[in-house]
């Protein structure tokens, strides 16, 4: 795209496509001359979908952004963290993914509308607005119940406010960064937990004698339970507590889901392919099954330039001389 030939080739490709979507920094497409008006000239019924941090209109439209910035500006970072502590922020660019999901939904609606009307449209996705959308339940809590999301009394971690579940959280287990989730909702589940862990003395503490007592003293209860879980394998804890009628599950990592989880194995999510660079490897498939068709996992994601011949010969219609001209100008990656 830094060459006139590259921009010419892009325009020829756009003229053959029904959807164009991009998430470059604001102003990049304009510098290449690919405004909505120009794209519409190339393909009158095209759907032109654009994603950016702030959207392509308004006083902040020119600001550059990425996931952590979007999370902070939309308010998501502020509501993340332990009660009475500063906001923790996230270690993942979560909104990069979520904005793309919103864009996908918008594209599907636009394709449906074009099927009914014959007309394309322009789509402008603001990642910050997508972040605000995710705050809906909390905005209702603030507006209706007049509560702040940063109160010291706000539930810590994965605790529930209603019903009175205790213990309820994610507890350390044997090994580095290994965890197990445990939830107890009533007296019968508590008795199952007590029996499963061998009825240690602390379970007789007056602070833990009723579900209301345990809910009121969750900090102390969590400390005792964490001491017990921290010296045991998470899967061992999971199976032991489940057999006693207690809701428990090991927090899984990538190795667990890929190699050990029997449910995922039964569904056949992962499959093997011979990747042209890294060799045989496992890949994840589509997350659903259908009665009348199945996925055809015939190749891995294309390498840079791997499909040039198909795209430029069959879709764009270049002949040998044109291919040579664009390649010589550096417009086509080889």
Image: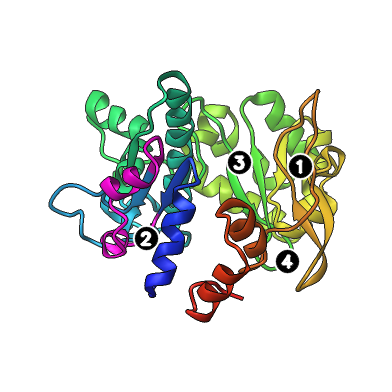
| Disc with the residue nearer the chain's start (3 vs 4) | 4
Q: Nearer the viewer, mark 2 or mark 3?
A: 2
Name the residue tied to disc 3.
205
- Kindly give the residue lying farthest to the top in the view shown: 116
Q: Nearer the viewer, mark 3 or mark 1?
A: 1
Toward which corner of the image does residue 269 lie, by quadrant? Answer: top right
Q: Which of 126 and 207 lies nearest the eye of the viewer?
A: 126
Which residue is at a point 42% across and 46% down the rendered structure image? 99
Q: Which mark is residue 24?
A: 2
Query: What is the span of residues highlighted in magenta in the rendered image?
Result: 23-48
Would you say residue 1 is visible in this rendering? no
Secondary structure beneath label 2: loop
Q: Nearer the viewer, mark 4 or mark 1?
A: 4
Toward which corner of the image does residue 320 lie, by quadrant? Answer: bottom right
Q: Magenta stretch: residue 286 in it?
A: no
Which residue is at a point 51% across and 25% down the rendered structure image? 163
Position of 280 compared to 305: left or right?
right
Name the residue tied to disc 1.
199
Which residue is at a point 79% across and 29% down the rendered structure image? 293
Residue 97 coordinates in the image, percent (x, y):
48, 50
């Amino acid at each position: 795209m830094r060459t006139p030939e590259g921009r010419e080739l892009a325009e020829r490709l756009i003229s053959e496509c029904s959807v164009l979507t991009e998430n470059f920094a604001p102003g990049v497409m304009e510098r290449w001359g690919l405004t909505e008006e120009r794209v519409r000239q190339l393909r009158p019924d095209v759907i032109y979908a654009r994603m950016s941090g702030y959207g392509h209109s308004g006083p902040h439209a020119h600001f550059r952004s990425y996931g952590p910035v979007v999370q902070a500006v939309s308010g998501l970072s502020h509501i993340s963290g332990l009660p009475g502590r500063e906001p923790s922020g996230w270690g993942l660019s979560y909104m990069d993914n979520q904005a793309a999901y919103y864009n996908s939904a918008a594209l599907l609606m636009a394709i449906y509308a074009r099927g009914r009307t014959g007309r394309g449209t322009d789509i402008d996705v603001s990642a910050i607005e997508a972040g605000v959308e995710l705050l809906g339940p909390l905005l209702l809590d603030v507006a209706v119940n007049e509560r702040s999301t940063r109160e010291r009394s706000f539930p810590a971690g994965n605790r529930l406010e209603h019903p009175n579940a205790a213990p309820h959280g994610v507890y350390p287990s044997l090994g580095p960064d290994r965890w197990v989730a445990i939830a107890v909702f009533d007296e019968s589940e508590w008795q199952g937990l007590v029996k499963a862990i061998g009825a240690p003395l602390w379970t007789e503490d007056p602070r833990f004698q009723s579900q209301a007592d345990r809910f009121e003293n969750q900090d102390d209860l969590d400390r005792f339970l964490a001491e017990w879980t921290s010296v045991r394998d998470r899967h061992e804890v999971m199976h032991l507590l489940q057999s006693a009628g207690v809701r428990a599950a090991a927090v899984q990592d990538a190795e667990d889901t890929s190699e050990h989880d029997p449910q995922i194995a039964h569904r056949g999510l992962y499959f093997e392919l011979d990747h042209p660079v890294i060799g045989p490897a496992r890949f994840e498939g589509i997350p659903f099954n259908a009665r009348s068709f199945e996925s055809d996992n015939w190749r891995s994601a294309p390498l840079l330039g791997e499909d040039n011949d198909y795209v430029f010969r069959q879709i764009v219609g270049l002949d040998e001389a044109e291919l040579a001209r664009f390649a010589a100008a550096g417009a086509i990656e080889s």
